[in-house]
């Protein structure tokens, strides 16, 4: 079992039960899934292949290439063009990815003072954006052709943003104190 999953079961669940005054342990908020999305735009096939391989290396799961749903002439975009890649992580891979994100990748960001606490959508989901994929230790910056950003959405079963913030704080997410 991953260290993040053990931490959730041993430390986070009892703390949340007490803080939110819940009696049933099944009603305690938990992380349902993590979606990692990398929008590449209209790039050539080699660059897209390299970026999807890097996304697969970061997440430990093969990336799904996303296609444009409709044509937009101002963006020189045609229906069916490959414009990005995404990965949906659940269960053990999700906990492993969160562990690496919180403990290894985020501290490697230059001048890091915490992630924004305003990325909650009101239903208990949190989204954060990263400017480059090279902060992950699996990626060698010397062999990366293009620097690409990504969005990471953490979907929780929390009913409100405050409950989700408490869950992620107890799991170790370093929120900025403004």
Image (cartoon, helix red, strand yellow):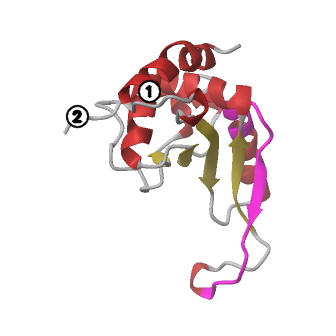
Q: How many marks?
A: 2
Q: Residue at label 1?
A: 16
Sequence-wise, which precedes: disc 1 or disc 2? 1
| Residue 108 shows in this picture | no
Q: CA distance from mark 1 to mark 2?
A: 21 Å
Q: Is residue 162 magenta?
A: no
Q: Between residues 142 and 64, which one lies in front from this camera angle?
A: 64
Give percent across and percent down for residue 133.
56, 38
At x 63%, y 26%, the residue is 95
The answer to whether mark 1 and mark 2 are in CB contact below 8 A is no
At x 71%, y 45%, the residue is 87
Tell us which disc is closer to us: 1 or 2: 1
**Is 121 situated left or right of 43 in this image?**
left
Q: Tell me: residue 56, above or below residue 10.
A: below
* Residue interval drawn in magenta: 55-73
Q: Between residues 8 and 97, which one lies in front from this camera angle?
A: 8
| Secondary element at image label 2 | loop
Q: Give the image quarter of residue 92.
A: top right
Q: Residue furthest left?
A: 178
- Which mark is on residue 177? 2
Q: Give the image quarter of residue 16.
A: top left
Q: Residues within 10 Å of mark 2 (few under 14, many from 20)?
A: few
Q: Is residue 61 magenta?
A: yes
- Please state, as top left, top right, bottom left or bottom right, where the N terminus lies in the image: top right
Q: Residues within 10 Å of mark 1 (few under 14, many from 20)?
A: many
Q: Between residues 45 and 28, which one lies in front from this camera angle?
A: 28
Q: Give the image quarter of residue 172.
A: top left
**Is 125 situated left or right of 166 in this image?**
right
| Residue 157 shows in this picture | yes
- Please state, as top left, top right, bottom left or bottom right, where the C terminus lies in the image: top left
């Amino acid at each position: 079992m991953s260290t993040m999953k053990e931490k959730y079961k041993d430390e986070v669940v009892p703390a949340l039960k007490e803080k939110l005054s819940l009696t049933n342990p099944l009603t305690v908020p938990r992380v349902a899934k993590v979606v990692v999305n990398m929008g590449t735009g209209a790039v050539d096939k080699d660059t897209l292949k390299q970026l999807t391989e890097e996304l697969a290396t970061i997440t430990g799961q093969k990336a799904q290439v996303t296609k444009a749903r409709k044509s937009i002439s101002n963006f020189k975009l045609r229906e069916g063009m490959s414009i990005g890649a995404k990965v949906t992580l659940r269960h053990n891979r999700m906990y492993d990815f969160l562990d690496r994100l919180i403990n290894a990748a985020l501290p490697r960001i230059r001048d890091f003072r915490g992630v924004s606490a305003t990325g909650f959508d009101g239903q208990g989901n949190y989204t954060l954006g990263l400017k480059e994929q090279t902060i992950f230790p699996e990626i060698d910056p010397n062999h990366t052709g293009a620097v690409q950003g990504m969005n990471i959405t953490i979907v929780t079963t929390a009913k409100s943003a405050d409950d989700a913030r408490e869950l992620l704080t107890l799991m170790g997410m370093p929120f900025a104190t403004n």
